[in-house]
Image (tube, rainbow, N blue to C red):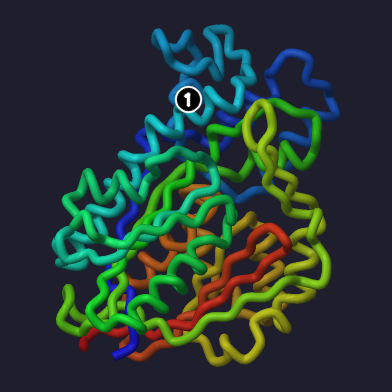
Amino acid sequence: MAPRIVAIGTTVPPVRLAQNDVRDMFTAQPGTTRLTQRLIHAAFDAADIQTRHSVVSQLATAGDPAPGDVLFRDAAGTLHAPGTGARNDLYIREAPGLYAAAARAALRDAEVAPAEVTHVITVSCTGFFAPGPDYRLVRDLGIRREAERYHLGFIGCAAALPAIRAAERIARADPDAVVLVASAELCSLHIRVSNDPQQIVAASVFGDGAAAAVITGDPAAGRPGGLELDGFATTLTTEGETDMTWTIGDHGFDMILSADVPRIIGREIRDAIGPLLHSVDAWAVHPGGRSVLDRVESGLGLDAAALTLSRHVLRTHGNMSSATLLFILREILHGDLADGAAVGALAFGPGLTVESARMTKRTHP
């Protein structure tokens, strides 16, 4: 039996941000020029996002932080620029709980006990610590101490598919393997005030969230059905190496997201996926932004309804980097797609890297 995604669990931080409120917060910052205000309005209003979530409560309510907390926004509403170390300290505090909540939800839905997990793969590009999230999941969830652990760090928005691909390779090589894949991305930790249009675009789309998947090739493990993993592909576009980048700066991680990214994806997407994703019944496309989805839709000649789930997740959660694709796949798992339907998954990362996968929906063994 082909390895399959048995179940997916998701979670978001409790702080919910309305897109219009975040837009207005940025436009009200001291020293913001009229040109920058126009750019902020244009970027936020064009994003097709209504709400996002964040671990930074000050983004929702202005006020002095609690003692020992990181200052992002003061009582006057002014945004500050914490150092990278302070931002990462908040990641260390908040990320493990989100990883654990998503993983528990996935295991519960899969009807798999933590002690049955043989391998753990964690994913993130928004923070670092060691012993890392893979260690914490084993310790906190009651996974066997002998479980093999791997961490995919700093791959960016595309990372969920390489993680699923690695889990599929493990499950294919070891028929008894039960692999837990977990992603947590706290993108809002790296928010900042800037006149740079690329930074403004980044501030307009990114949110926080976590997701986890249980993957196995053992037909007796967990509940029946799921998403069979049929094949994967990865490639680089012919240009775009400097159009999407993610580096570590003194005041958080620095994102470059140029306006050329959607154009490059739209022009090269058909050749990038090759024959893997022909005759697809449902699509899970990473919503890097509304314009990325628009270009994928036009580049592949898709029906307007084909990316409904991707647009829904973008509208309600924003771009949660690597976790986002798992949110979309969970919608497909719990939807009414018929048994045997083909699912195409796409994600894009720095490089530009195009990751793709073909899956088959199974409602019975």
Quarter that holds the C terminus: bottom left
Query: What residue do we see at 73% from left, 13% from top?
Result: 30
Quadrant in which residue 291 is drawn:
bottom right
Residue 297 sits above or below residue 11 on the image: below
Q: Position of residue 77 (x, y in %)?
A: 58, 13
Secondary structure under the numbered disc 1 in the rendered image: loop
Query: What residue do we see at 67% from left, 42% from top?
Result: 202
Q: Position of residue 336 (x, y in %)?
A: 32, 77
- Image check: 244 left or right of 99? right
Residue 332 sits above or below residue 44 on the image: below
How many callouts does the rendering have? 1
- Image check: 118 left or right of 247? left
Whether residue 361 is visible: no
Q: Position of residue 28 (x, y in %)?
A: 68, 19
Whether residue 313 is visible: yes
Residue 175 sits above or below residue 41 on the image: below
348 vs 307, nearest the viewer = 348
Residue 357 sits above or below residue 187 on the image: below
Q: Which residue is mark 1?
A: 60
Quadrant in which residue 21 is drawn:
top right
Query: What residue do we see at 22% from left, 82% from top?
Result: 218
- Other-residue count near label 1 (Cα within 10 Å), few / some / many at <14 / 14–19 / ≥20: some
Quarter that holds the N terminus: bottom left
277 vs 169, nearest the viewer = 169
- Image check: 360 left or right of 247? left
- Three-letter amino acid code at the position of disc 1: Ala
Query: What residue do we see at 71% from left, 75% from top?
Result: 298
Q: Position of residue 308 (x, y in %)?
A: 51, 67
